[in-house]
Image: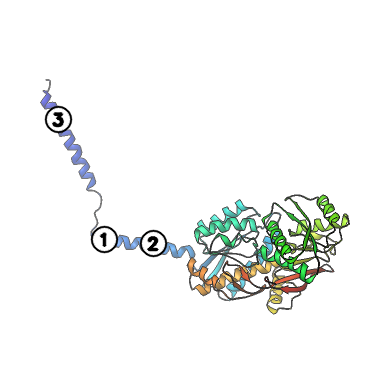
């Protein structure tokens, strides 16, 4: 029998009402909580969060490190990392910081800015570090400093000399003096100590470090009345410098400023002698390492007569320095270079700042660094308004195949 239109409508309504009742019944199966029960759940959630926060640090304080442990500038990265590792070991042997041991986590960034950025992100996001010691060379250090500034991460580069590094943010410090200091001081050294008036320059135009020293050197030479008779450059990867050196020879300089890294420096020195250029060679702390056996080889005297700015001289009788050199020799079976001493000082300053801050709060650590008074291997250090260290600069003379202390100068001399 066919249903009337009214009956069909009533059937649909009954079906819809049944569905609504079923849904309501399902909704009532969700457990309801009283206000007291809800508060208990929230308290449990907070406890879990606090436990997770505690587990993220545990019984250690995590400090990150970045260094080129492989690649073209690995001699610097390995030395800086060795120094930092030695410092952290000594701190832990004396009880650690804030009653906890330091867990020092280091990644190899291969001397590459992209690798350095990726490694930094891993330290922050995965390892949950509270502070950073690194990077080592200027290019990666600038890149990392930009990221660290966004995170307000306390950062100290032991060896990055570019002025741009600490300009990235108030959280960024350095243990070494800046390129401007080195370049300006060496120009002053030529004028006031060597009493010379004609200089030439050859630098790596594609390297921040070399460019920075060259710019500072040129500016101070003009102030000091030192004439630049030849200004030559090259690019990273170049190995033949004879064309530039021949032009420099024709200009008859009294001294040649070579503000580059050790591998390039020894090639330039040897090729300069081949073209007949026999003048004193001067440079920055990138010369430290030029006497390493795998760099200079058996001809240990090829760099004799060169002067360069550095952070210490191995024959300086300073007790703290000599104790460090002995400890480094015992730990690694080799002689330390300045990058090792700076790595040590950088790590020690970070540990001291955390202890003096009384916590791992970033702002507290940064404030402690700004006000630090540190008695270091490379000198007694405080920081200026730009977070650059105030300390003396050592002039090293390479003599008889050895680094020797020639003099110490202040940056304002």
Task: State the image quarter where residue 82 is shown.
Answer: bottom right
Front in this rendered view, residue 372 or 52 = 372
Decide if residue 305 is on the left or right side of residue 16: right
Residue 64 locus on image (x, y percent): 57, 62
Residue 236 locus on image (x, y percent): 72, 51
Decide if residue 239 is on the left or right side of residue 57: right
Whether residue 113 is situated above or below residue 173 in the rendered picture: above
Give the Cα distance between marks 2 and 1.
17 Å
Instruction: Check disc 1 and report its element: helix, strand or loop.
Output: helix
Instruction: Check disc 2 and report its element: helix, strand or loop.
Output: helix
Give the Cα distance between marks 2 and 3.
53 Å
Front in this rendered view, residue 408 or 57 = 408
Residue 233 locus on image (x, y percent): 75, 52
Task: State the image quarter where residue 210 is shown.
Answer: bottom right
Task: State the image quarter where residue 307 is shown.
Answer: bottom right
- Mark carried by residue 208: none
Pick whichever of labels 2 and 3 is earlier in the sequence: 3
Whether residue 158 is situated above or below residue 10 in the rendered picture: below
- Mark carried by residue 11: 3
Pick whichever of labels 2 and 1 is earlier in the sequence: 1
Pick whichever of labels 1 and 3 is earlier in the sequence: 3
The residue under the point 85% across, 64% down is 301
Residue 386 locus on image (x, y percent): 57, 66
Give the Cα distance between marks 1 and 3.
44 Å
For label 1, the crowd category at 10 Å Cα-Cα, with few meaning under 14, some 14 to 19 and many 20 or more, is: few
The residue under the point 29% across, 62% down is 40
For label 2, the crowd category at 10 Å Cα-Cα, with few meaning under 14, some 14 to 19 and many 20 or more, is: few
Quarter the N terminus occupies: top left
In this rendering, does residue 14 appear at all? yes
- Judging by the rendered image, the residue that carries numbered circle 1 is 37
- Judging by the rendered image, the residue that carries numbered circle 2 is 48
């Amino acid at each position: 029998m066919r249903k009337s239109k009214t009956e069909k409508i009533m059937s649909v309504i009954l079906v819809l009402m049944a569905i609504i009742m079923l849904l309501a019944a399902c909704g009532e199966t969700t457990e309801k909580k009283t206000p007291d029960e809800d508060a208990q759940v929230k308290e449990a959630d907070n406890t879990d969060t606090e436990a997770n926060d505690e587990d993220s640090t545990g019984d250690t304080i995590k400090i990150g490190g970045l260094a080129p442990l492989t690649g073209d500038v690995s001699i610097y990265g390995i030395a800086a990392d060795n120094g930092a590792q030695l410092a952290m070991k000594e701190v832990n042997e004396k009880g650690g910081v804030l009653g906890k041991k330091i867990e020092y986590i280091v990644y190899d960034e291969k001397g590459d800015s992209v690798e350095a950025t990726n490694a930094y992100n891993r330290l922050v996001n995965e390892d949950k570090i509270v502070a950073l010691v690194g990077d080592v060379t200027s290019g990666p250090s600038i890149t990392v400093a930009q990221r660290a500034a966004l995170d307000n991460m306390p950062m100290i580069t032991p060896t990055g000399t570019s002025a741009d590094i600490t300009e990235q943010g108030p959280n960024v410090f350095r243990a070494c003096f800046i390129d401007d200091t080195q370049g300006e001081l060496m120009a002053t050294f030529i004028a006031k100590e060597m009493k010379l008036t004609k200089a030439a320059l050859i630098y790596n135009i594609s390297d921040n470090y070399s460019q920075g020293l060259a710019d500072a050197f040129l500016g101070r030479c003009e102030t000091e009345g030192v004439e630049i008779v030849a200004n030559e450059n090259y690019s990273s990867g170049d190995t033949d410098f004879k064309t530039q050196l021949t032009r420099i020879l024709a200009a008859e300089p009294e001294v040649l400023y070579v503000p580059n890294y050790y591998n390039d420096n020894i090639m330039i020195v040897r090729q300069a002698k081949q073209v007949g250029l026999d003048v004193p060679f001067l440079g920055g702390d990138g010369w430290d390492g030029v006497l390493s056996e795998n760099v200079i080889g058996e001809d240990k005297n090829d760099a004799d007569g060169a002067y360069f700015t550095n952070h210490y001289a191995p024959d300086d009788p300073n007790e703290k320095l000599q104790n460090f050199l002995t400890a480094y020799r015992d730990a690694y079976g080799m002689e330390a270079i300045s990058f090792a001493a700076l790595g040590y000082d950088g790590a020690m300053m970070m540990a001291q700042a955390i202890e003096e801050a009384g916590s791992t709060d970033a702002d507290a650590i940064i404030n402690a660094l700004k006000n630090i008074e540190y008695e270091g291997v490379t000198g007694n250090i405080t920081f200026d308004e730009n977070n650059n260290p105030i300390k003396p600069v050592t002039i090293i003379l390479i003599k008889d195949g050895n680094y020797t202390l020639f003099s110490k100068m202040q940056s304002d001399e």
